[in-house]
Amino acid sequence: MIGRYILIFSIFLFCFSIVSCIEQSTNDASKSYELWAGEKPGHGVWAIHGKYWQSAHFTKEYITYLELSVVPRWKADYIAQNKLTISADSTFSISDGPNWFKPKKPYRIWKQNGNTQLLCVEELASSHIFLFEAQL
């Protein structure tokens, strides 16, 4: 009886390890947002462009680039939840970013203190924001 449980548990662990070790990569805007946020875009957010990569490692290492159109409430919530502050930098560059990851001026740059792996650029003339986030 105990041997059966050990066998079932071993099969479960094997299947879990196989599934959790699959690299994910997409350039689809909605799919990128869904992989990043854990939900489909909606309720005040529309995915315009996206690029997402996640390693096959079980610690969820990922890099995401998103261009979103958002309502003011979504943007405010994102800024508050991530404790972002306006950066003194007037320009930014992401060397490995996709070609579309270029917000139009004027824009405002938001950063997390001490974290270079999270960046939010807000186009002031539109409802678009550009997000870069990496967890490596």
Image (spheres, rainbow, N blue to C red):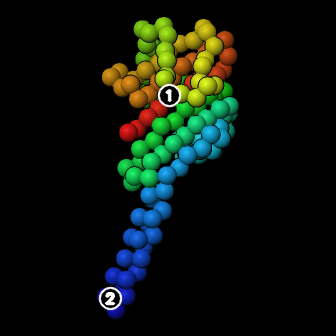
> Horizontal and vertical percent for residue 96?
50, 28
Disc 1 to disc 2, C-alpha distance: 51 Å
In this view of the protein, can residue 131 be seen by the observer? no
Q: Total of numbered circles in the picture?
A: 2
Q: What element carries label 2?
A: helix
The residue under the point 62% across, 40% down is 27
Question: Crowding at label 1, few (<14), some or many (≥20) Cα neighbours within 10 Å?
Answer: few
Q: Residue at x 43, y 20 (%)?
A: 111
Which amino acid lies under the numbered mark 2 shown in the image of this protein?
Gly
86 to 75, vertically: above or below: above
The amino acid beneath tag 1 is: Asp
Q: Is residue 84 left or right of residue 3?
A: right
The residue positioned 51% from the left and 42% from the top of the image is 53
Q: In which quarter of the image is residue 101?
A: top right
Q: Residue at x 44, y 28 (%)?
A: 118
Viewer-nearest residue: 77 or 28? 28
Where is residue 122 drawn, in percent x and y?
57, 18
Camera-side residue of 127 and 114: 114
Horizontal side, residue 21 vs residue 35: left or right = left
Position above or below: 84 against 6: above
Q: Relative to residue 124, is residue 45 depicted above or below? A: below
Q: Quadrant of the N terminus?
A: bottom left
Name the secondary structure under disc 1: loop
Residue 3 badge: 2
| Rendering coords of residue 16 (x, y %) | 44, 66
Residue marked by disc 1 = 96
